[in-house]
Image (cartoon, rainbow, N blue to C red):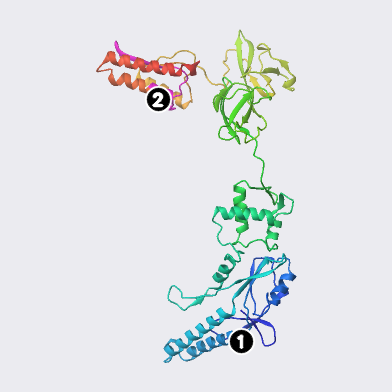
Amino acid sequence: MLVPAPQGKRCLVLLEKREPEEKPLPKIEDIKTNGDRILLVLSPDKRVPPEEAERLFNAISEKNNFCVVTGDGTDLAKLEDKVRRIWATAKVVQEDGGERSPNLAELEEEAETAEFEFNSALINLFNRAYYPARLPKGTEGLAYAALKLVERRSKDGGPATIDGEAAVEEALSATGASKLIVDLSAEQTLSSLRTRAEDQLWGTTERKTRWKDVEERAISNVRWTWLPPRGLDEIKRVALANGQWRDSGDGYVEKGPFPAAKTSVKVVTRSYDDQTGVATIELTATDAGPNGKVHFAQTSDVSAKSPIVPDLIMERDDTVLWFIAVDPDGRHETGEPVKWTNTLTLTYEPREVMRKRSVALTVRPRGRIRWNTDGTNPREGKPYTVPIQIEGDGEVKIYAYAEDAGVETQRTFTIRSVAAGVIQINPDKPVLLKKRQKIASTKDVFTMLKALKVAHGKIRSSLSATVGQGDVNATTRSHGAFRPGRRDQRSSGFGRALQVASGRLEQHPERARARAQRATEGKEAQHRPLEE
């Protein structure tokens, strides 16, 4: 609280139960207003607004960053008398033995009376809160709201106190002033404040402005309302989340409205079969509305007249595909085509007949191959048309290049030397066992399956199993690739067929064979397209 000191300087009276202490305060013109919002308590005078408050307002640029609590009277001496009475009562209690004082009851009553009279004087003295505003005549200055200091009993039954901060908030947030907003939880409030910020804190014509400038205008423009701590950042966060503002990432923020985003297609290759060159593609239309359609073509002139993808997950062996998304509702403009490229896989197969070697090159799914053996740029090598004949018995490297529709790949293949009477094994190539294997015992079956599992082997042709002996037996078959140890639809179906065959064979041999045959036929029909 500010009261006049005997020398005419301003001073602060500390309202504690000890002798009042006077501390000099900075001069009005020395108060810093470019940081957090500040609250000044000034000695009341009869001017509206108070003379020193008006002088401060006219001297600073951060005119919207302070408020003043004062009154409309000048009887400040009475308040100082009440403070001294409170201090004197507390000192007597201390000198008279404190809580052991024989006059404790009388002194406590005197202290309560002094505090009551002080609170009453304080309530009557400070009754106005001045804040920056646009005045009725169009000028900028300090307006005031009625300040109602109220004495309240504490919840724990302690002495009555006056919550000055709550009283100031109530005065500034009242309908008449509407200078302070204390609750930003309502979506409507944030939307209104965003619109107000665009009008008052942006430049006159700019859609894009520096956020630091917005913060500076918030403490300078008296039309801008006051918010809780970091309230302006909360407005920004919600506006960015709703797409109403955009953060450029360089300290600038752009306000909307923005044109609707153009459509696009997200293309992800989920899997690729290097044996066939077939890729599984997953497509997602973005910014195309709830009814968006994806069109595709093999050239970049794809349009809304191009075929629509039959499924957003598709298998294709095309080298290049182009996609566009179209919003049939017309809310989003059609964006640029999106190019997807497949993978080219170069493979080789060395052959040796009568100690004459040759190498066949293949590219999947398609492409033109060039090659050489001298290590120069294979792009400029010989076109591949027939298997390459290898001269001599030494090791040879083939440098191969393949291209199709602008997609390229390169590989270097090492053809091992030929040694008389010695079989050369390439450790980089998998073993392919073409001879059909027949395993008679259950033990040997499990031994073979275990070995295949350890070697990550795969059965590429049909697999059959017979349960029973002699005329009492049932056979089930599975077509297509089968990987031991991997649970998939094919292996589980094959297992179910075995269960049907073995579970009923002993009791009903003929019925079991028929049931197993039906189960097998169902799996054959289901897996035949995969095999083809």
Secondary structure of the residue carrying numbered label 1 = helix
Q: In the rendered image of this protein, does residue 219 appear above or below residue 167?
A: above
Q: From the viewer's side, name the closer residue of 443 and 300.
A: 300
- Dots 1 and 2: beta carbons under 8 Å? no
Sequence-earlier tag: 1 or 2: 1
Task: Name the quadrant containing residue 130.
Answer: bottom right
- How far is disc 1 from disc 2 in space, using C-alphas? 96 Å
Span shown in magenta: 469-494
For residue 316, side relative to residue 478 (left or right): right
User: Which numbered disc covers residue 492?
Assistant: 2
For residue 145, side relative to residue 525 (left or right): right
Task: Name the quadrant containing residue 228.
Answer: bottom right
The three-letter amino acid code for the residue at tag 2 is Ser
The three-letter amino acid code for the residue at tag 1 is Ala
Q: Residue 308's spot in the image, x, y percent?
A: 59, 24
Q: Residue 253's spot in the image, x, y percent?
A: 68, 50
Q: Which residue is depicted at the point 61% across and 50% down? A: 239
- Category of crowding for the residue at label 1, using alpha-carbon neighbours closer than 10 angstroms: few (below 14), some (14–19), many (at least 20): few
- Find the residue positioned furthest to the front: 137
Q: Is residue 478 something one can see in this rendering? A: no
Q: In the rendered image of this protein, does residue 162 appear above or below residue 232?
A: below
Read off the residue under disc 1: 77
Q: Which residue is depicted at the point 39% across and 17% down? A: 522
Q: Residue 63's spot in the image, x, y percent?
A: 70, 66
Can you tell which of label 1 and label 2 is closer to the viewer?
A: 1
Residue 411 counted in the magenta span: no
